[in-house]
Image: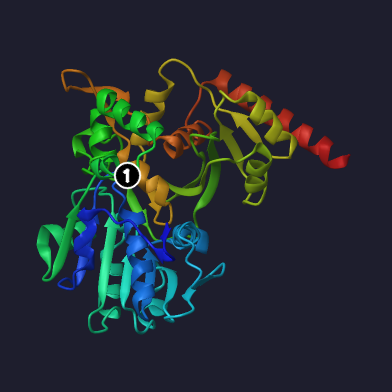
Amino acid sequence: MKENNTVVVNIPIEYKPLFDDNWREAAIWGGRFSLKSHTVARYLLIQARMGQKRIGCFREFQNSISESSHQLLSDLINEYGLTDFEVTDKSIVNKITGSDFLFKGLHHNEQSIKSIEGIDIAWIEEAQTISEKSIEILTPTVRKEGSKLIYTYNRLTETDPVHRRLVIEGRPNTLLLNLNYDIALKYGYMPEVIRLEMEDDRQNRPSLYKHKWLGEPQSHELKIFKDWNFIDDLPHEARLECYGLDFGYTNDPTAITAIYKYNGGFILDEITYSKGLTNERIAKILLNLPQALVMADSAEPKSIDEIRVYGVNILPTEKGAGSVLQGIQYVQNQKISVTKRSQNLTMEYHNYIWKRDKENRITNIPEQGYDHLIDSIRYGFNAIKPRSDITESRLSEQFNKNTHRQNLNSTK
């Protein structure tokens, strides 16, 4: 807000150490609604107005500017009426001080990162996904006298490279801030709908609550899937088997995963993880991919029929009593690899856990919340795993009907 033409930017007192000069690297971690990203973005805008700064905004994976912190910074510039900033679709520049923001992904971008000169502040968002190699490349690149690196993250595992480097092993001149949702409650920044979600998780999903809201890494014993391998890219020899589709819209994302057969196992590649997708948009996404059978959640027959009309070869997955556990067991028995660009799938892999009962015993019921891409994978594997003769016959019959219908549509 503005008072007497002076812009007032509110920063929680707990983040005040950011404005000190006695640190080189900062680790800021915690659960949801700890105001990490919003506060660091405000700090960077303040720094950009105080003098000429070159600010690098990095993530491990960034395929487009829309996946960066550009939107958050732009929203704050508009919120506070900071007319001294010029915002384009790819850059942010302060017209008075000359400060500029750049946005880059770190993965597979080694030479581009090494060539960047004069970084004053580097902000690495979603730093729980950053690799040790990327840290080793970025740290000496940000070498200007007095330069700083800020890592914001929610922990995934006990061995996240950034947490191991800065907190467990420790580095000289490092600022450590571990903050959680109580900051948002204290300053009135948590919407009531989110507070209710948090309270529901605390009462009914204690393991999920500890990770999601307190930022604790998941216990290994609770993890449903273990020992998946993470690979840089899809090998050319990998053979596309099918796609799995889990529907979402307002509250949950639509999730699509491609399943490839390779070297005696399977490779999973995240395609889509987005809210607000119409059936037409889903169909367009699928039609722009290499063609293969799509197995979708049978709870949405109307959506499946509508997507099929657009020419997508899509079938409902078979569901019934015990189908979730059967699907989990089948996936557990496979040799699984995941492409490193599959960020949301990686997040779900680390957070897909078994529930505990009231006596704190582990059950065979999965926690809900981190299961959208996981569900799409189960659906996709229903097209791959062995079936009874009756099931195989029904699937083949439905496949032939769909193919015939698509051929008729294409001749109209």
Q: Position of residue 202 (x, y in %)?
A: 26, 28
**Image quadrant containing the C terminus:** top right
Q: Residue at x 57, y 18 (%)?
A: 390
Quickly name the residue at label 1: 33
Residue 49 lies, with reference to residue 285, above or below; the image says: below
Q: Quadrant of residue 15?
A: bottom left
Q: Position of residue 253 (x, y in %)?
A: 50, 39
Q: Position of residue 46 (x, y in %)?
A: 35, 68
Q: Quadrant of residue 4?
A: bottom left
Q: Residues within 10 Å of mark 1 (few under 14, many from 20)?
A: many
Q: Residue furthest right?
A: 412
Q: Residue at x 77, y 37 (%)?
A: 406
The amino acid at mark 1 is Phe
Q: Nearer the viewer, residue 366 or 39?
A: 39
Confirm whether residue 335 shows in the render. no
Q: Residue at x 49, y 54 (%)?
A: 238
Q: Residue furthest front?
A: 4
Confirm whether residue 19 shows in the render. yes
Q: Residue furthest top?
A: 321
**Image quadrant containing the N terminus:** bottom left
- SS state under label 1: loop
Q: Nearer the viewer, residue 335 or 3?
A: 3
Residue 263 lies, with reference to residue 101, above or below; the image says: above
Residue 394 lies, with reference to residue 228, above or below; the image says: above
Q: Nearer the viewer, residue 297 or 46?
A: 46
Residue 323 lies, with reference to residue 289, above or below; the image says: above
Left/right of residue 406 with respect to residue 174 in the rendered view:
right
Q: Total marks drawn?
A: 1
Q: Position of residue 133 (x, y in %)?
A: 28, 68
